[in-house]
Image (cartoon, helix red, strand yellow):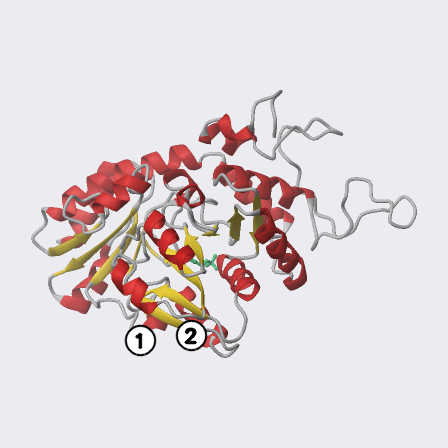
Amino acid sequence: MTHGNDAPHSLGFDTLAIHAGQEPDPVTGAVVPPIYAVSTYKQDGVGGLRGGYEYSRSANPTRDALQECLAALEHGTRGMAFASGLAAEDTLLRTVCKPGDHVVIPNDAYGGTYRLFSQVLRRWGVEYTPAPLGDLDAVRAAIRPETTLVWCETPTNPLLNIGDIEALAELAHGAGALLAVDNTFASSYLQQPLTLGADVVVHSTTKYAGGHSDVVGGALVIGDPELAERLAYHQNAMGAVAGPFDSWLTLRGLKTLGIRMERHSDNAERIVEFLSGHPKVTSVLYPGLLEHPGHDVAAKQMRRFGGMVSFRVRGGEEEAVAICDRTRLFTLAESLGGVESLIEHPGRMTHASAAGSPLEVPADLVRLSVGIETVDDLLADLERALG
Ligand SMILES: *Cc1c(COP(=O)(O)O)cnc(C)c1O
């Protein structure tokens, strides 16, 4: 989107979220990009494409609108929308890695990401080493001559550990590798990894970007045009694209991302304060806490600290599971980032696939996705559930 001579990036985040890629429809004037539920486009003579559209796996106007918006929000040159976060990851990995390559991954990566490496990419001949990304010496030691990619997730799911994006980019680039950052937990509003030196940003747009627990999707945003070109080729060649209705829902969600993240952060801060003083809670994991080991880095690279809060409880796995069963407003469910508050037990739910691996999570851990409800109601619910 351009207004006169203004570069789009001179506009504020919320303006871009509402307008980037979303010019009124040139034919009807529709203020919101329509859902182009169409697979193919009439050609005016062989090869005579009207709007550049030919077949919707290759390009679709609704998906294009979303992709342009995603690129603007992350200050990238190109955004790509996929059928899920894992589809985006798979397309990225099989574009930038080849059999024989090696990747450094967080030792507390999202369970599905770990499974993609351990069960799929590995059989394809890509090796990986889990390392604590908060420890730069450990990351340096994990890098090999064949390392083509460092995979960063910050904050991590579900332990809320922090990686220093700027420092990791420098480390990766020094070793001739790329840095990918899974920005799902922070969202584009709280953190913009490309501006800190990352090469690719990954999102599960299922989470904060969509924001209403009504759509599954993924995204990649890239800075370097040559890398973007290679990825766009693979997006089409591998075909894991977002459909037009899913793209429309995600674009609708993005419009309120900024105000939602402010409220998620406000509510999470109040809940962290409550949990920190509760006798049943042994520790609270939240990068906004001064005593969090990644606090200074998080404060440097994030606008605020977000809506995800994990905590460990006295009484072990049994008590952690019981708390998850006792909340009423916090719905017991996987996923995160929606307007409604969710609670889960990572060990038995989202991270069950990491059991017995180096990425196993503590059994006494509870994860909250703090929603945007009235915070006093959320506090009362937790107070009752903790007993
Ligand atoms: C959910 C999630 C993914 C996977 O995304 P899907 O949309 O479920 O495929 C990747 N990374 C993180 C951090 C996630 O929370």
Give the x, y percent position of residue 82: 57, 54
Front residue of this view, candidates 381 and 194: 194
Vertical placement of 133 versus 71: above or below? Answer: below
Name the quarter where the N terminus is drawn.
top right
Kindly identify the residue that appears in the image at 33 percent across and 68 percent down: 142
Residue at the far right in the pictured view: 45
Quarter of the figure with residue 134: bottom left
Quarter of the figure with residue 289: top left
Give the x, y percent position of residue 368: 28, 52
Give the x, y percent position of residue 153: 36, 55
Q: On the rendered structure, is 10 left or right of 316? A: right
Quarter of the figure with residue 359: bottom left
Front residue of this view, candidates 113 and 327: 113
Is label 2 in a helix, a strand or a loop?
Answer: helix
Mark 1 highlights which residue? Answer: 357
Kindly identify the residue that appears in the image at 34 percent across and 34 percent down: 262
| Amino acid tagged 2 | Ser
Q: On the rendered structure, is 338 left or right of 5? A: left
Q: Residues within 10 Å of mark 1 (few under 14, many from 20)?
A: few
Vertical placement of 380 versus 121: above or below? Answer: above
| Amino acid tagged 1 | Ser
Q: Which mark is residue 118?
A: 2
Are the residues flagged by discs 2 and 1 in contact, CB closer than 8 Å?
yes
Q: Which mark is residue 306?
A: none
Residue at the far left in the pictured view: 279
Quadrant hosting ligand 1: bottom left
Q: Can residue 350 be seen in this snapshot?
A: no
Q: On the rendered structure, is 28 left or right of 6? A: right
Kindly identify the residue that appears in the image at 52 percent across and 67 percent down: 97
